[in-house]
Image (cartoon, rainbow, N blue to C red):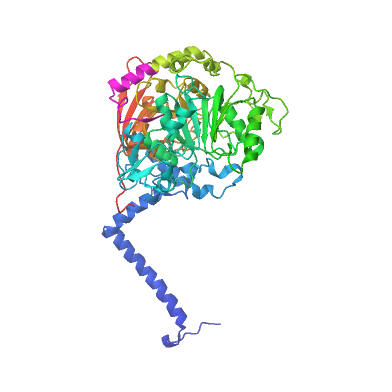
Amino acid sequence: MGHLNLPPSKRNPRQWKLLDIVSAFFFALVLLFFLLVFTPLGDSLAASGRQALLLSTSDPKQRHRLVELLELGHHHQPIEACPADSVDHMPCEDPRRNSQLSREMNFYRERHCPLPDETPLCLIPPPLGYKIPVQWPESLHKIWHSNMPHNKIADRKGHQGWMKEEGPYFIFPGGGTMFPDGAASYIEKLGQYIPVTGGTLRTALDMGCGVASFGGSMLKEGILTLSFAPRDSHKAQIQFVLERGIPAFVLMLGTRRLPFPAFAFDLIHCSRCLIPFTAYNATYFVEVDRLLRPGGYLVISGPPVQWPKQDKEWTDLQAVARALCYELIAVDGNTAIWKKPDGDSCLPNQNEFGLELCDGSNDPSNAWYFKLKKCVTKTSSVNGEYAIGTIPKWPDRLTTAPSRALVMKNGIDLFEADTRRWARRVAYYKNTLNVKLGTPAIRNVMDMNAFFGGFAAALKSDPVWVMNVVPARKPLTLDVIYDRGLIGVYHDWCEPFSTYPRTYDLIHVAGIESLIKLPGSSKSRCNLVDLMVEIDRMLRPEGTVMIRDSPEVIEKVARIAHAVRWSATINDKEPESHGRENILVATKTFWQLTSSSS
């Protein structure tokens, strides 16, 4: 049957509507083309399109191509800024993603990193009103409110002396929930029972640290405390701590070992940290025992120690400590102090927690994404002298080759050569490259490839602390670093680090390309662009980056440095050094979002 041709007045009105829409759409496309080609709107949309490209995670091929262009220096525009709401972003502690995960043993509050292809390729901006941080040691007591304008802790804990808002600053009176009269008087009380002074104790771990009043006050006793807390409802505890210039790390005791070697800490402290040490057959107490050096001290202040309505928990806590032969030195109010035995635990013995010694297959220093074990680490499973009393006091232990250096062939000779090498290199950094080490401008320092901690040891007279990072796929030398009286963590640099943005003044790395290579291979597991964007995230505006590597690698690094908005120079290595190396020294420029980009 043929179509019936009707006069216009008889056509279906719905057909007229459809024709109108199609025609309007066509003319709109023509108009948009004209605007894009012949007006400034085209430039504006092109700029936003570039940002969409850089932020895009929907097309991995597009992202890989962009990374390749950046590494070759063929992408001449700087990497775009991330959105304004990302100023405090930590990729592996993103509550929007982690909230979907299991709450069993706080799994959802541990590290959970996005895949590289899912990570936006953009630079984290500072918050509006950001200022160069208050310098050390003044920063211990006050920081700029505008640098992290989060008032929840001040509002909720101000009466306990945690922190208060005062004019343009947050101030830190030095108090805490369990020591409202101040951490100094609390530490003085601890000194009645444990050797706080004299160099016997050097490395400490403060679990669930709040704003680290404890760790900050321990510094004047010569005790270096690594404070940790998860990202939680208090908003940015660890960000406040690092802004103050106190060693800190975002961390949660959940389903995995903490990223430290066995027998690392001389003192472990919990002040109302609310860790259920006896839950899950005392699994968390067993993890504390793995980390605590033989002869070291455990201090738990707050619940369940003589706490109302927690009689059973307090009884269980004492029982598990007895099962591991810990000596209860004192119970002073709500503070309990134990000393770990110098030698092997008195297990196996009968105990209600079913605790047993680990077998010989257990490496107690393997702690990167390693599931918590319910067995107790034998001190005899680790070779060498590392108990308190068998290692020198601070500061002598810094330069004495520890027996655990023998984990490597010719380890003692390597240790001594490494110590001399870094003393020469740091002197060159200061005297020839004019890096501001030793001045108040640099307080928080990271060494991304620390080995034996020689770089940090060479800074012993400077007003700095160093986060020594031992890459998880390299020899596990972090125990040597702790035996020296320094601190650090394991980490894989193909993932973001567990810290807030803008938390380090200087970041140093020797052999940056080795951090992304498969061991024993020329193939890369990840790329330099993502790694340098991560370095930029951690670095404070006007902070310093120092990278040592071959001239070819440094040339590639310099190209990417331009894309991440660093001002960089390439320098020769110190004259005494052998091998082919250049040194890139860069400054992170202080840029801010414009109103249009935010």
Q: Quadrant of the N terminus?
A: bottom right
**Residue placed most toward the observer, 445 or 516:** 445
Which is more toward the observer, 579 or 539?
539
The spot of residue 549 in percent (x, y) is: 39, 25
Q: Which is nearer the eye, 291 or 455?
A: 291
310 or 430: which is nearer to us? 310
Q: How many marks?
A: 0
* Residue 230 percent coordinates (x, y): 50, 41
Where residue 590 sits, quadrant-wise, is top left
Across and down, in percent, residue 126 comes to 34, 44
Is 437 covered by the magenta stretch?
yes
* Residue positioned 49% across, 23% down in the render: 482
Specify start and end residues of the magenta stretch as a single range: 422-447
Residue at the extreme front: 333
Relative to 366, residue 121 above or below: below
Q: Tell me if residue 20 can be seen.
A: yes
Q: Is residue 40 magenta?
A: no
The residue under the point 38% across, 21% down is 460
Of all residues, the one furthest to the left in this rendering is: 39
Q: Pick out the residue farthest to the right.
A: 350
Residue 94: x percent and y percent?
Answer: 48, 46
Query: Which quadrant would residue 510 be assigned to in this image?
Result: top left
Q: Would you say residue 470 is visible in this rendering? A: no
Compared across the picture, whether 540 is left or right of 61 comes to left
